[in-house]
Amino acid sequence: GDHNELYNSQIVNPAVVPGQPESSSISPHSGVGLGVSKSKFNVVEGNLVTGWYIGLSASDGTEDLTVRNNIIAGNVGNQIVIGPRQGMETVDDPVPLRQLYEGNIIGGSLTSDGIQTDSAGPGVVNIRGIVIRDNTFYFNGEDALDFKSGGDIVVENNTIVASLGDDDG
């Protein structure tokens, strides 16, 4: 749906919370903490997202998304991934447009990037109008920012601390 707002919540994988009973349905550092797809005019602000494989996924036609003043950290893979869902990539898919990532703390990925854009195929530039501003990126297993596909991306006034940067593509 459209016009959703999520404020001041903790989106924590229960399998990584000390003292919680073990669950056979959720394993530590699996799944996606917060997924946004096929929607417009959403705000995600003031949240903690941790313990997942991917912290936040903005895919499949997500437009006019604002992600502001969150802590998205301690997820194994990408903290934030923008683009088609894995295995669903086609050139005809609706694409992520007009997204703002501002004032977030993004880091602690064990194996991947702070923010990564994914492509619908070789040579396809299908992600447009992304602004990445005033964020702090720290200790990501690969790069703070990894643009595999995208155009019209503005990156300004971010702080990057100790990303490993393996440049996998």
Image (cartoon, rainbow, N blue to C red):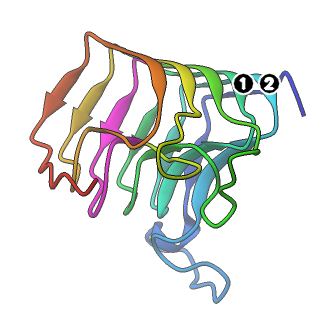
| Displayed quadrant of residue 126 | top right
State which region is magenta.
102-116
Disc number placed over residue 40 in the picture, else none:
2
**Cα gap from disc 1 to disc 2, whole angstroms:** 5 Å
Instruction: Please tell me whether residue 152 belongs to the stretch shown in magenta.
Output: no
Q: Characterize the local packing of mark 2: few (<14), some (14-19) or many (20 or more) Cα atoms within 10 angstroms.
A: some
Q: Secondary structure at mark 2?
A: strand
In the image, is 37 to the left or to the right of 161? right
Q: Secondary structure at mark 1?
A: strand
**Residue at the far bottom in the pictured view:** 24
- Which residue is labeled 1 in the image? 63
Residues at discs 1 and 2 in contact (Cβ within 8 Å): yes
Q: Is residue 77 above or below residue 80?
A: below
The rendered magenta stretch, by its main secondary structure, is classed as loop
Which residue is drawn at the image coordinates 47% and 64% (left, top)?
Answer: 53
Could you say which is closer to the camera, residue 124 or residue 37? 124
**Mark before the other along the chain sequence, 1 or 2:** 2
